[in-house]
Image (cartoon, rainbow, N blue to C red):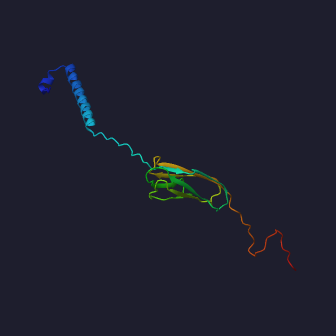
Amino acid sequence: MVLAVNQVRNLSPKTIKFYIKMKKLAFTIGTLLLTVFVASAQEKVTTPPAPTSLAEITFDKDVHDFGTVEYAGNGTYEFKFKNTGKEPLIISDAKGSCGCTVPTYPKNVPIKPGETQVIKVTYDTKRAGNFNKTVTVTSNAKTPSKTLTIKGKVEPAPTEETFPSNGKKDDGATPLEKH
C-alpha cells in the first residue's frame, strides 16, 4: 500500500513505525524467496563414478634396504612388477620424494596382462648418512597409486691425506740449517 505525503502527515507515529516494519519484513521475505529460487534453479552436477580398471600392478617387493653403501657407490635398485590384471597397464607417472631419488619407468607404454617390467630407482650416494626415500607410482590400475621405498646408510666420504707441495710427507720435524 502506497501512502501519499498528505496521508502520512495524518498518521500517528505508531502507525508509521508499523508501516516501516512491514516494508522491511516484505523486503526480507522477497529477498529470501529470490535466493531460494536462484539456488534451486542451479543445475545439479553429479560426478559419474570413476570407471574401474581391470589393470592391476603387483610388485615383487615395495621396500628395498641397501644396507650400508660406500660413498659415491651403487645406489640403484630395480623394482620388478607384473600386470596381474585383465587390461593393459599404463604407468603415467613416478615421482621421487626428493631430487636425490630418481625413478626410470616405462612411461605411457601399455604393459599387457601377464607382462613383467621394472622401475629403476637411483639414489644419489654422494650424501652421507641414513636415508629413507619413496617413489610414488601412478597408473591406471585398480589401485592408482603405489609407494615404493628405498632405505639404507651411505658411509662418510673417504678423507685423503694431504702432503706438502714438495711431495714429501711432513713428519712435523723442523729441518736443520747448515752453517
- Which residue is at 21% across, 20% downward? 13
- Judged left or right of residue 41, residue 58 is right
Tell me residue 19's x, y (percent). 20, 24
From what the image shows, is residue 44 above or below residue 33?
A: below
Tell me residue 59's x, y (percent). 54, 51
Q: Residue furthest bottom?
A: 179
From what the image shows, is residue 59 above or below residue 5?
A: below
Q: Nearer the viewer, residue 26 or 10?
A: 26
Is there any visible trace of residue 130 in the rendered image? no
Question: Which quadrant of the view contains residue 79?
Answer: bottom right
Question: Which quadrant of the view contains residue 80?
Answer: bottom right
Tell me residue 176's x, y (percent). 86, 75
From what the image shows, is residue 178 above or below residue 146?
A: below
Q: In what quadrant of the picture does the C terminus appear? A: bottom right
- Which residue is at 53% across, 57% downward? 119
Question: Which quadrant of the view contains residue 155?
Answer: bottom right
Is there any visible trace of residue 82 in the rendered image? yes
Tell me residue 164's x, y (percent). 75, 72
